[in-house]
Amino acid sequence: MRKTLTAALAASAMVVALAGTTLGAHGGEPTLIVMQHICNPSIQSEADFVAAEDAGAGGQPGGEGTLPGLVATVLACPTVVLSGDAPTDGIGATPTDFDYTVVDSAAADYTLSSDGMLMAAKLCESDIALDVDGDGTMSPDTCLDVSMYSFEPVAEGAVTATQTAAVGDSRFGTIRFTPASTDEMALVAAASGVIELDTSLDTQVDSPPLPLAEYNDDVVVTHIYNFQNVAAAPSATPAPAVSMMPNAAMENSASSTTSGLLLLVGGLFATSLAGMVVLGKRRNR
């Protein structure tokens, strides 16, 4: 049986995607979220990835843990959903096949293709006050797809997510977490497509950009980036086509402040309430 869910609050998936929001305090049942990215062929190493991240987006300097840095990585490495699932109309990669297994501390075993719940979401220039395509405007019509999959609930404590089927002809590259969250504290190790987390290490955000109850410690959002195997022979399932922004979106400029990041995230909350629908997908196991 398949369930489709429509959120009463249209912004909830965007809140999760770009503000590190969570749903309950420790002692509850955590949610693990996987957002899969496929990088363009020019990104072949962690150094290539960091260079794009550091360049930032929309004329704002980037770096790990900044919103312009995260947007830059989504530009260079768009999100991808499973074939058969529908992403938003934002810029992203063509749906294709890939998979993960997730094992929690209670030995519950999930697969993304069978148990993951699709949360379809997009991020528009006007939501985050960034001119990501460099055309001099911040448009509600220029958007990035930021769709993701959730596993809920998972038992508190150790959780291992393993990439069992890569996106097309690609390999695990790197992992990032949402700015303004403490999700990165849950990371234990990540190598060769095996991501080890401890959800008990994620902490409450005491001074969030906005006073929202969702800023606590029971959701961990992982942004997982795959690099294309451009030197390898073509595979039976090629890497999905990617629609990219112009290079102007990756320009660097004068440094930004932490308060600027919080204002951008706050702007996302304030403006995204009208435009996004969350769709859920889960099959009985």
Image (cartoon, rainbow, N blue to C red):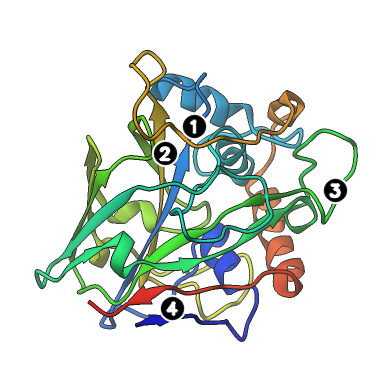
Callout in the foreground (2, 4): 2
Q: In the image, is 184 to the left or to the right of 86?
A: left
Q: Is residue 251 above or below residue 95?
A: above
Asked which quadrant contains residue 244, the reply is top right
Callout in the foreground (1, 4): 1
Amino acid at circle 3: Met
Q: Are marks 2 and 3 in contact (CB under 8 Å)?
A: no
Q: In the image, is 200 to the left or to the right of 86?
A: left
Which quadrant, please, contains the C terminus? bottom left
Disc 3 crowd, CA 10 A, few/some/many (<14, 14-19, 20+): some
Amino acid at circle 1: Cys
Q: In the image, is 4 to the left or to the right of 250?
A: left
**Disc 1 element:** loop
Q: Are marks 2 and 1 in contact (CB under 8 Å)?
A: yes
Q: Which residue is mark 2?
A: 225
Callout in the foreground (2, 3): 2
**The one of 243 and 130 positioned closer to us in this rendering:** 243
The numbered disc on residue 138 is: 3
Label 4, label 3: how many angstroms apart (C-alpha)? 30 Å
Q: Are marks 3 and 1 in contact (CB under 8 Å)?
A: no
Q: Is residue 140 above or below residue 105?
A: above
Mark sitting earlier along the chain (1/4): 4
Asked which quadrant contains residue 152, the reply is bottom left
Q: Which residue is mark 4?
A: 23
Residue drawn 50% across and 68% down? 21
Disc 4 crowd, CA 10 A, few/some/many (<14, 14-19, 20+): some
**Disc 3 element:** loop
Residue 260 coordinates in the image, percent (x, y): 70, 49
The numbered disc on residue 39 is: 1
Mark sitting earlier along the chain (2/1): 1
Amino acid at circle 2: Tyr
